[in-house]
Image (tube, coloured by chain):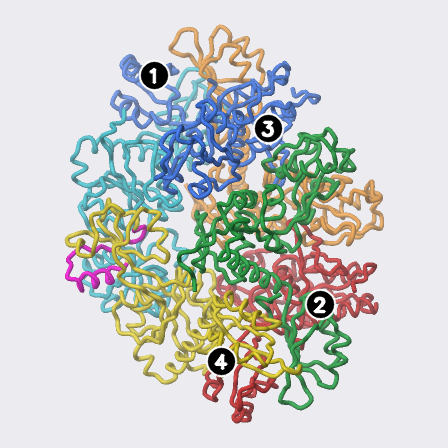
Chain colours: A blue, B orange, C cyan, D red, E green, F yellow
Amino acid sequence: MPDPSRTLKVAIPKGSLEQPTIELLAKAGYEIYVSSRGLRPSSNDPELDLYLIRAQEIGRYLGQGFIDCGITGYDWAYENDVELIDLGELPYSRATTRPTKWVLVVPEDSPIRKPEDLEGKRIATEGVGITQRYLKERGITANVEFSWGATEVKVPDLVDAIVDVTETGSSIKANRLRIVDTLLTSFPHFYANPAAAADPWKKEKMDRIALLLKAALCARGKVGLKMNFPAARLPELLEKLPSLRRPTISQLSEEGWLAVETVIDEIVVRDIIPELKRLGAEGIIEYPLNKIVP
Amino acid sequence: MPDPSRTLKVAIPKGSLEQPTIELLAKAGYEIYVSSRGLRPSSNDPELDLYLIRAQEIGRYLGQGFIDCGITGYDWAYENDVELIDLGELPYSRATTRPTKWVLVVPEDSPIRKPEDLEGKRIATEGVGITQRYLKERGITANVEFSWGATEVKVPDLVDAIVDVTETGSSIKANRLRIVDTLLTSFPHFYANPAAAADPWKKEKMDRIALLLKAALCARGKVGLKMNFPAARLPELLEKLPSLRRPTISQLSEEGWLAVETVIDEIVVRDIIPELKRLGAEGIIEYPLNKIVP
Amino acid sequence: MPDPSRTLKVAIPKGSLEQPTIELLAKAGYEIYVSSRGLRPSSNDPELDLYLIRAQEIGRYLGQGFIDCGITGYDWAYENDVELIDLGELPYSRATTRPTKWVLVVPEDSPIRKPEDLEGKRIATEGVGITQRYLKERGITANVEFSWGATEVKVPDLVDAIVDVTETGSSIKANRLRIVDTLLTSFPHFYANPAAAADPWKKEKMDRIALLLKAALCARGKVGLKMNFPAARLPELLEKLPSLRRPTISQLSEEGWLAVETVIDEIVVRDIIPELKRLGAEGIIEYPLNKIVP
Amino acid sequence: MPDPSRTLKVAIPKGSLEQPTIELLAKAGYEIYVSSRGLRPSSNDPELDLYLIRAQEIGRYLGQGFIDCGITGYDWAYENDVELIDLGELPYSRATTRPTKWVLVVPEDSPIRKPEDLEGKRIATEGVGITQRYLKERGITANVEFSWGATEVKVPDLVDAIVDVTETGSSIKANRLRIVDTLLTSFPHFYANPAAAADPWKKEKMDRIALLLKAALCARGKVGLKMNFPAARLPELLEKLPSLRRPTISQLSEEGWLAVETVIDEIVVRDIIPELKRLGAEGIIEYPLNKIVP
Amino acid sequence: MPDPSRTLKVAIPKGSLEQPTIELLAKAGYEIYVSSRGLRPSSNDPELDLYLIRAQEIGRYLGQGFIDCGITGYDWAYENDVELIDLGELPYSRATTRPTKWVLVVPEDSPIRKPEDLEGKRIATEGVGITQRYLKERGITANVEFSWGATEVKVPDLVDAIVDVTETGSSIKANRLRIVDTLLTSFPHFYANPAAAADPWKKEKMDRIALLLKAALCARGKVGLKMNFPAARLPELLEKLPSLRRPTISQLSEEGWLAVETVIDEIVVRDIIPELKRLGAEGIIEYPLNKIVP
Amino acid sequence: MPDPSRTLKVAIPKGSLEQPTIELLAKAGYEIYVSSRGLRPSSNDPELDLYLIRAQEIGRYLGQGFIDCGITGYDWAYENDVELIDLGELPYSRATTRPTKWVLVVPEDSPIRKPEDLEGKRIATEGVGITQRYLKERGITANVEFSWGATEVKVPDLVDAIVDVTETGSSIKANRLRIVDTLLTSFPHFYANPAAAADPWKKEKMDRIALLLKAALCARGKVGLKMNFPAARLPELLEKLPSLRRPTISQLSEEGWLAVETVIDEIVVRDIIPELKRLGAEGIIEYPLNKIVP
């Protein structure tokens, strides 16, 4: 029963994470409707009050308490450097399933080989805070300047090094650059403002969202597997295929046969199916899942 | 066994409902192939003879008997004002799951506050019949003129009020207009020509299509839920969660555990999963459905 | 456990089959990542070394042994005329589920009515080898020239006939052309180089891929069907609906009811559901499948 | 000097004529700015009050006096059947420079061969008024129904004939239809409301716009041609090339040479240039024009 | 003669000004070739060494001397607050010919009515420097925070006011916001680094570019007008139409007629052409211009 | 006067040269209308019978006499190796004004350093004839195989070298390849079949098209320059600026001033304008040209 008098202010990251985040929320049961110019989306849960905010700024507005909770990268929360409650990592990303990496990059033929070589140099980056904290921890003094974009083109003419984001590293290679070090590895997290987390109604609401987001993510890359199996060979099956953890086994009407059903990583299917056939499984089917409660 | 000598003439609405209708038919088991300029689609059912016709005109051609049956909005069937057999409402729409509304709209600062204020005024609308019947029922005399589109821009310079379609009302607000009244709420229906409905072969064919369309629609917004559950706590589960109507319960090989499986509204999942965990459910998974026979 | 020291070189057809092939591989469990200019895709299986090569050339490079295996049309393998091991037909195509046909085409009003009328004529085609072997088998001598594309426009001004590819025949009709004969019907196949097929590690790897591709294709157009059924009427069900081959039947907790589950062709569903209801089935649901192990 | 207290209400046709009309106005000196959702464009002339209205409705609102003047097709003005002042034909169109034709169309194999064959038949058209007036003039009685679009697909299943718009006739041929008669040939016109035309300030303003629109249209397909020419051969030039009407001839500093300059149809240039060279012209150049005052 | 040993480092603004700047340079005689990922364009002048840099950063890199000269908005040069040589304003912009305005914006119903009401408030803006200098000049203390975009949505939930860029003000009205004050009006300028401006070779090169940019801009909105005119009425023409400043007048072969040619503002043409006809001008044509040397 | 009984069959290259060729023909006075699927364009010259044919095949069909004349690259005419009449080079190309180059390309680190290193190697190329003639001239024996596209990815895995087309060389660098030699440099030419060139009517028609194509190309990169100049300094002007070849000079009404007009390369304008100002020129304007008769 929604409580009409209460709402939770939730920030969704505008930009490259926007579409994957909206799809993840849909899988979790929350349909988000973004109108063409709209920066205040609506949803199928009247208790949610939604804001589309740049990932870079969500941490700041969470810290100031204008927003109760939101999804943003660990990197930007770190850059913002405010006190937040972490409700859990959400391991998805823009295009692949790999985390975002912040890397220190120089031209292929640069004399800079290790972080210490940055002493006295000039670095351009969109993550000024990330870079300055990294240098400080190592006792290095360098000139860090904010880059508004097109960062890769700046070395070596305008700066000595850059700190930039990469998912696959392919654009770095194409520009004939070299990675010196990785400063940070980052997935999105679901963060809360501390005061909001102290409010029982908001806390329970946020915990539920976190649970469903994790259930939806958990179902990614997993599938249901179902087969008929000769009862006599069940122990052999369980011994040989430990990845079939705790299958649901039920009696079939046909004597001597069991229905075996389980959930496994999709990537394991390609290895396990030939084994199952060898052990006598019949009618093996694989079906998709929406959520797995962790 | 398809009867090669018999076909059913079916109209599909061309325009904004076209894509959702074709997707719904696909879910119901009827693949429709529309070629780039083609207005006579083909399908995977040789007994169907398909026509792409504007939603506004389907009622007319059904009434005249040139087509046996078709999907069109209740609004346009009402506008056409012909005798049709209604084989059932199909609650889907262009973008959301909300019905189309025909609303009487005026500028925010117009003196028109209630339908009676329209007396002697000029109204532009794409639904001339809908508007005239509405006025007649209320004994109001006004000048209704057909609008070829861009209706919103006509108030207040060219007409005093408009009757226009809206799903969300957002464009009305953005144009600084105000809704005075709702004339009609409309979902698509599956309609038949009376003579076609009197032909047993056509009637059975149309009933089957209607059943499958409803089964496909019924599965929208519903999901399958499956879990292992301690047998001892089953009564508590059934009592506390009445939304789990008539679950399928089967024995597991493991003593004291049951497999519980049910179909529920997707929107309920986000509330029910925390409850299920509390009651002792394990291995909860949610999976998608194609059809639910109502 | 992937063997880092071993890889299988696999060719994926670049062009119109590219997207459907990548989707099929994904369904089989192999995610392929193609970068914007990249002709060397990566994947989620480190043992695969992937090449995007035009379908026309895959046969050639497989024959020369530069590639171990690959997916390409039977037509192009036949055109290339090299010795390959056929690991199985994969009945999918660009847009529909129909095979590609190579047809001999002339203008509607051409005097050419049968293959023999080609004697001494000029034919343009992208499949010079296919056409020449066809003519040779029939003892016909004609002038076959390679066409770089836009083949349809060449009759009757530049050549007397063309041999061209079609899936639906619609473009042939629109150009007022006529089909004289079908030279070849072709689906993609999974082919291996003979030397690669003699290497046990590669052979096992290729067999596994072939099995999973077939399992994914097998699930296309099939669905899972699940229902509760009165135990007493089970024999009647099985007799009347032979398409429900070998359902999985398990006991329900409720006395006298069984859970019946099976996999059937999606196209049969629209005929079978009314029957099932008549026989007393309840809670009929249809759900999608990813793979069916054949 | 713009008079801030006075404005002229001008309608621009929304839809397929919109872009060419805005480009023509720009050539005439009036820059029109249409915002993304805006139906009330702004311009670089503060005395203009602009409306984007469907071509079909401009005649109606001009007749009612809500708009002072506007550009719309002769066909739609005729369809609307209201009294308007015609300020001149503007021979441009959507894509080509050919006028729009309203044609009576039937299937290639229809028994309808001449207008009289329509007696008692059913005709679908977007131009109900145009069609009814055409039939009335010929004493033919037929059933004319309004078509909301996709008119071509309606013959022969839903109606016996259609009256539709064509610029090139190519889509008619592709659909295997046949033209029986042409009802109307139409270019856009610049029309005024009679009361507006009686207001001196508005009349002068509209005349000026009409003059500039015609000057801009006049320059389409015309170019400037400039050359040096031996004075002695001038009479021969003027005699042989009558298309060089009234050239501007001026003295050059070089003895015995004249500068000859003229405006001609671009399409004539390809024939005249070889002649000019033969007659001794040198330094022939062709340059583009914006306006030619007629 | 290009000096192969010398180059001028020129920055072109990447982003919304990029395309109009490249078009302006082309009109000035400098063709710029930008490859798809390329941030180092090439050109038809081998003495230019080009960089695509964000408008926000050009001032910084000019100030540091890494670049000799570049085009960027006055606003961003002001924001960067470095010492630059101004080689001239270039009055063009993204879409229209209006300058960019930086405006202080609040919700329509905000209590903030004048700049002083900002005391103690929170302001989000992309132009932190511009905003802080504005506040400082007025002795106002407020909290200015950097906005990464989507600034408009932040009032009133996240901040009290914003300082944002506008060309037409239309998006401000659509979002129901109100402009309190204009901080800055800005066109692009051509700026040089002081050291580069002290190098004679670079200075001459930059002056030439500046002259040609201005000549190209000067020709925007101007056209050439050419006509034949009766010699006797020339004094009357020159008296009545002072906007025809200093026309080029030459003798025609025809007695009593002159060729009159001039350059005027395109916007004046619509007023002057009716006058010219009245005064006896014939053969009036208007033609486009590329450059006018100021 | 078009001769309705005679037509010239003209081939236009389909593919990357299609759009620039159609634009060039338009500048020359021939408007070409290509419908969406149409491979037989129409035009504003009824004597032309147009064919869209792949550049690779135009030479073949010209040689066979099915087409009278056509525009295709010198490279493909050379590849086709047939006897054609060359009516002139047309120095335009796809994107830039640089010719197409056919280059021998290997991986950056390949041991192949000079053509002779190809002995016994395998080469993939779309230009098999070009490559074989190149090798033969040098007495090199290598295996040349036809490549259907994506040629760059084939080195070094599938072949040792490729012969590929490049305009700018940028894609070669990006793929870490190295150019060993240039086989051919090619612009489009206007070619005729020898028999067609022997027909006087066709010959005159083709010569006229050739002249106009060259006049249109000649105007590319050239502009008209016009100024008022003090008569006394004219000799100085002509001496100092030899690039102002043969200007048109006429008397102005104003004593002591001349009107000077000329056509020059656009690229020279940026150098000459400062000089002109220094010499006393006033009212300098630059205007665009359509054609210059060479």
Badge 4 crowding class, 10 Å Cα cut-off, few under 14, some 14 to 19, many 20 or more, is: few
Distance between mark 3 and mark 1 Cα atoms: 48 Å
Residue placed most toward the observer, A169 or A88: A169
Residue tagged by mark 1? Answer: A258
Which circle, 1 or 4, is nearer the viewer? 4
Chain hosting mark 1:
A
Chain of the residue where label 2 is placed in the rendered structure: E
> Residue beneath label 3, please?
A11
Observer-side mark, 2 or 3, equals 2
Disc ID at residue E268:
2
Q: Is residue D115 visible?
A: no
Instruction: Please indicate, yes or no, whether residue C35 appears anywhere in the rendered image.
Output: yes
CA gap between label 2 and label 1 equals 91 Å
Quadrant of residue D98 within the rendered picture: bottom right
Residue on which the image places disc 4? F246
User: Do labels 3 and 1 touch, CB within 8 Å?
Assistant: no
Q: Callout 4: helix, strand or loop?
A: loop
Quick check: is E126 in the magenta stretch? no
- Which segment is the magenta one? F127-151
